[in-house]
Amino acid sequence: MNLDHNLLVSDVMRNSVAGQIEALKSLETRINGSFTAALELLAECRGRTILFGMKQSGLVGQKIAATLNATGLSTHILNAAETWEDNLSMIGPGDVIIMLSYSGRTGELLRLYPAIRQMGNKVIAITGDPAGPVAEQADIVLDASVVESREDREPAPTTYTTVLLAIGDLLAETLIRRRLFSSPEAQQSDQNVVGLLTSDSI
């Protein structure tokens, strides 16, 4: 590689980091009552939390599910492409559904809504389009929108996945801190959870 090429590569890397930092700063300004409502819904969940996502959203959803599980909240992620209206029997009446969608128009998620609505489950949508159809049918919408160039958006929505991951982490961390202010038994339990989340085994 020549010097000019190395400088170009370095600029692309710096721009990528700068873009993700700006996206996280923007997310910070959007933390509002919807995030509080989502937190309360998860904290009061007496069943499980079920995540649905496709492609990159689904992959990040696996990390979110693992982190929420570590807080003591039973969490599972299902492949929306392999889930149909007639095989949603695994969802219980007390389960909370989280829909993950970059475009806000993911067809595999939209076709599940009628059955989920019929069962009466609450739905949280975390989406890059808070005005899209995935968000419109949800009870709570968490805005994961980002500003990305067309070149960045089409092959892999990298900035969006950073924001999505941050939302999952902030929900998990706040769940732990919320419980630390509750009963002594919960405080002891959550001290164990904090130890697990910060252990070298992760």
Image (cartoon, rainbow, N blue to C red):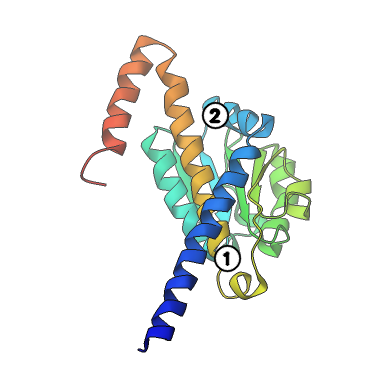
Distance in Å between CA atoms under marks 2 and 1: 31 Å
Q: Is residue 22 above or below residue 30?
A: below
Q: Quadrant of residue 141?
A: top right
Q: Quadrant of residue 147?
A: bottom right
Amino acid type, callout 1? Pro
Residue at 28% from the left image edge and 27% from the top image edge: 192
Q: Nearer the viewer, mark 2 or mark 1?
A: 1
Mark 2, residue position: 45
Q: Is residue 90 visible?
A: no
Task: Give the image location of residue 177, x and y in percent.
Answer: 43, 24
Residue most toward the bottom?
A: 2
Task: Give the image location of residue 27, x and y in percent.
Answer: 60, 44
Q: Looking at the image, is mark 2 or mark 1 earlier in the sequence?
A: 2
Q: For this view, does 26 lie left or right of residue 4?
A: right
Label 2 Cα crowd, 10 Å radius (few <14 / some 14-19 / many 20+): some
Q: Is residue 16 above or below residue 143?
A: below
Q: Secondary structure at mark 1?
A: loop
User: Could you say which disc has been placed on residue 157 in the image?
Assistant: 1
Residue at 37% from the left image edge and 17% from the top image edge: 186
Amino acid type, callout 2? Cys
Question: Along the line of sight, which residue is nearer the eye, 157 or 76?
Answer: 157
Residue most toward the left?
A: 200
Task: Give the image location of residue 62, x and y in percent.
Answer: 45, 54
Label 1 Cα crowd, 10 Å radius (few <14 / some 14-19 / many 20+): many
Residue at 44% from the left image edge and 20% from the top image edge: 179
